[in-house]
Amino acid sequence: VSIVQSVRWGDRGVVIIDQRLLPEKCVERELTTLDEVCDAIRTLAVRGAPAIGIAGAMGLVVSTRPRKGDSREGYIEALRANAETIRATRPTAVNLPWALARMVRVGEAQAGDSEVIHKRLFDEASAILAEDRAMCRSIGEHGVALITPNARIITHCNTGALATGGIGTALAPIYLAAERGLAPQVFADETRPLMQGSRLTAWELSQANIAVSILPDSAAASLMREKKIDLVIVGADRIAANGDVANKIGTYSLAIAAKHHGVPFYVAAPSSTIDPETASGADIHIEQRGADEVRRTGGTITAPTDVDVYNPAFDVTPASLITAIITDRGVHKPPFHFPA
Ligand code: MRU
């Protein structure tokens, strides 16, 4: 599978594909300061749970580079402060705090001066990227076993190469199914309000020559009623210990529709998305985003400019609606239990 690289090292910083400009333009942007890293994550220039974890870790290295002549204590202090600033950009995907906490732990444990610690952290962020790539592959290998020839698959949001360091989470089994001649047919929810399905998933699957149609989110249930869908696969931003899953807003309605119509509902995610510290979905902090994301569509005013808006970026799908959770470790069936 040949795919785009959403996050990589550049000469001066972290290079990302600016996902705000897709599908019109595929343009890279280099992030060289703490502010640029935070802004890119907050505005979804880089997005998707695994990708923000990777960009956060690599961005932390870039942000502490000016401190590498400092005393060991000064450097560690900056490391902790910058990690906290990056963590605060988006609250729901656990991959971001997971990657940052790992970086801070490794930095604190490394003996030597700030130069040595800095070099160690560069290697650790590179390892986080490489591990994510490998986890995507394993998710694909486990998940492809669930895909029958010519399967008609609904997905939501973007969970592919753009959202990860590799071939994706929910899209990984689809990439491998295509590679193995199973000819999957993908139905991508548009994913209002920010259109990750129509802008990003449709773009990346088309690039890979995989059959994809887009539909308004509100059309998914009808498509299932017409018996035109064999399975649903979505990603996750945080999986609680009991198997409740936070993912892009609209995932919960898709799960309810799938349950009603007897369509299998799969969640695919790397181990870094499992949060054993969170007991259930009720404990997950759901990000609320700005009103103008809903009042305006593609820059055009599509609502009274002062109307109240409800704009949660994510919702929680209870474990009871999930057929199986596919991770890099295998296919987990209910009852789910992800202990620390
Ligand atoms: O707001 P986004 O675009 O970062 O939301 C992304 C999602 O909800 C994805 O489905 C999730 O991160 C899994 S992607 C590998």
Image: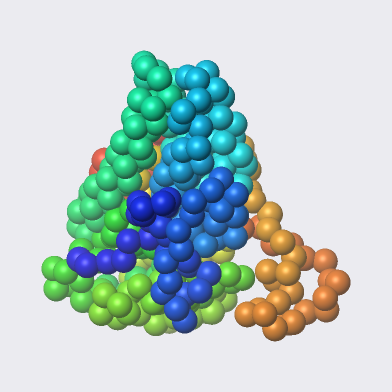
Q: Residue 161 sits in which quadrant?
A: bottom left
Q: Which residue is outermost to the top? A: 111
Residue toward you, 287 or 234: 287
Q: Is residue 234 visible?
A: no
On the image, the x and y values in percent for residue 334 come to 38, 42
Q: Which residue is painted at 68% across and 54% down in the image?
A: 288
Residue toward you, 18 or 282: 18
**Number of numbered markers:** 0
On the image, the x and y values in percent for residue 123 come to 31, 36
Q: Is residue 22 visible?
A: yes
Q: Which residue is outermost to the right? A: 306
Measured along the vertical axis of the image, is residue 164 above or below residue 305?
Answer: above
Question: In this image, 199 relative to 311: left or right?
Answer: left
Q: Which residue is painted at 33% across and 58% down in the image?
A: 168
Q: Residue 205 sits in which quadrant?
A: bottom left
Question: In this image, 205 relative to 25: left or right?
Answer: left
Q: Which residue is outermost to the left? A: 180
On the image, the x and y values in percent for residue 219 come to 53, 79
Measured along the vertical axis of the image, is residue 205 above or below residue 131?
Answer: below
Residue toward you, 60 or 209: 60
Q: Residue 130 sits in which quadrant?
A: top left
Question: In this image, 168 relative to 260: left or right?
Answer: left
In the picture, the quarter occupied by the N terminus is: bottom left
